[in-house]
Image (cartoon, coloured by chain):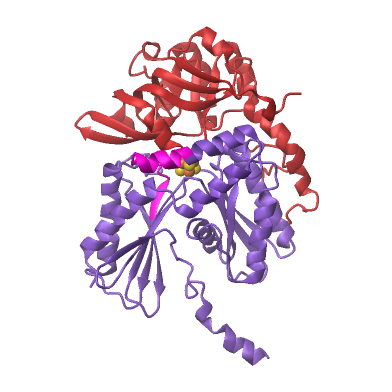
Chain colours: A purple, B red
Amino acid sequence: MISRETIHATAFELNRLAAIQIPGDARQAVGRMYKRETNKISKYVLGQILENYRIAVDEQRPMCADTGLPRFYVKVGNEAAVEGGMVALEGAIRQATAEATAAIPIRPNRVHPISRHDYNNNVGVHAPTVDYSFEPNVGWLELTAVHKGGLFGGDYRMLFPADGIPGLKRFFLDCISEFFRRGMSCQPLVVGIGIGGTKDTCVRLAKEAGCLRIVGDRNPEPEIAALEEELLQLGNSTGFGVMGLPGDGAIMDVHIEIAYAHTGGMPVAIQHFCFAHRRMSARIEGDGSVHYREDPGWFTPFYRRDSVGFEELEEQEA
Amino acid sequence: MTGVNDLRMRQWQLRTPLSEEDIGRLQIGDIVFLDGCLFTGREGFYHRLFDLGEAPPVDLPTISNVTFHCSPAVNETSPGVYHIPAVSATASFRFDKYLPLLFEQHGVRAVIGKGGMQPEVYQEVFRKYKAVYLTTVGYGLGAMYGRGIQKVKEVYWKDELGLAQAVWVLEVEKFGPFLVECDPSGQSLFALANEEINQTFEGLYTELPQPKLKRLGEVTSPGKEVL
Ligand code: SF4
């Protein structure tokens, strides 16, 4: 049985680690960009970003004061037993978020959307967002905290099969044009792209692709992996460096996730996940032991719905 | 013509309130660190001051002629005592309509923020008042900027506006780095960067047709900004 207190303590610690400690994959990616950059102001800015990562850890300060919108992704093992059930789990996450807001501190960003009232704790209606997925045959829980900047760097568009890959590339460049100028997306960043599904699935997948896969990871479908590489290359040959200044590139990686779409449509969503690349994960085993790690491991074969029996269908067709 | 790579990136460490002389020396691409005092303000501050016509919570020129578009991560260490470990800027373009009043009525001459403003605002407003726009670097360098904050001297409108929107008066030391994005002649670093990048960037669109379904109000030239 996994206790409520273990979940609560883990969720608190994940918020703290996410806020302060840049994951190694993102830090190394920025380090490589710094080495490669030939434009002097862009290089200066990249150097300051690396320095900021260091100060945050050395002095235990939040790396960016804009918390973004803190949220949690929870993967629940099918055999997991949780004290108080899923209701207690979500309660523990909400409590930990409010406590972490005051203790770390992380900025209380969440306000009522009309009255703008702020309870100063990052908790409210649908806040923090908690998303769930499931994993067969295991008894653990996995929690990932993400603090992603909230105002710029994403868009949704209904494209059509006739727009195809050129249409996708154009939309990808449009988002760069909209949000790389002046550095509004806080580049360098990871681009997450969702293709297909319903509008909400598409936007969700883009967010998850950007926030829950590590730099260097590739989609298991070879054609999609090739598209990730192609867009990465295209996006880094625009002339943009960091802060919208001339430079040799501002994209750490491109991650694409797909969902089956309406036969007439090709909806696409794009999300930019800034260099304050705050994510941290932990697995809580059935015996209550906790293991922290930087790779969220969110996109399992089961989560990508590998289990619907394509193989049988392909056999029948053949 | 001068390109972004030709800018000199001279470093300055300046004391607030900034003198006309100090401001006059700044050029786009220079790097500035500040010592002294400044106040923060964003939506709530501007709304009360200029939309509702309320008096500022304190006579602003007695504090500083530097303002910062941001909100901090704040720790209340004991009741009424605050510590700010990290601070990051927020996008300034939303506040441009208030700046003529801020400059004229409250003596502000330097705005720190994120992303700058449109070149017309610099030409029409900043140049007139010989003011500068200093952009934070990055932008999310919260830890680095937090380090430059020595003390929270005062906080106003905290109960009315919440921690994120309150007006914080900060004592700072070697606070920076900031890049000069608009100098007193009204030149813009980002405008210069845009011009340069557009030469490469627009070319990438040549083989890519317009989407089948357009959106109302769409900017159709990749060289244009959406701000
Ligand atoms: S986009 Fe990211 S780095 Fe930039 S201010 Fe927001 S949270 Fe910080």
Where is residue A307 drawn, in percent x and y? 50, 80
Q: Nearer the viewer, residue B4 or B216?
A: B4
Q: Is residue A63 magenta?
A: yes
Q: Which residues are magenta?
A: A51-71
Q: Nearer the viewer, residue A50 or A111?
A: A50
Q: Is residue A213 magenta?
A: no
Identity of the residue drawn at 53% across and 60% down: A209
Identity of the residue drawn at 56% across and 45% down: A188
In the rendered view of the protein, which quadrant contains the C terminus of chain A? Answer: bottom right
Where is residue B66 drawn, in percent x and y? 45, 18
Q: Residue furthest front?
A: A35
In the rendered view of the protein, which quadrant contains the N terminus of chain A? Answer: bottom left
Q: Is residue B215 visible?
A: no
Q: Is residue B12 visible?
A: yes
Compared to residue B156, the image places residue A287 above or below, namely below
Q: Nearer the viewer, residue B33 or A299?
A: B33
For residue B50, what is the image quadrant? top left
Q: Nearer the viewer, residue B61 or B101?
A: B61
Compared to residue B197, the image places residue A1 above or below, namely below
Q: Residue furthest right?
A: B206
Identity of the residue drawn at 28% across and 64% down: A89
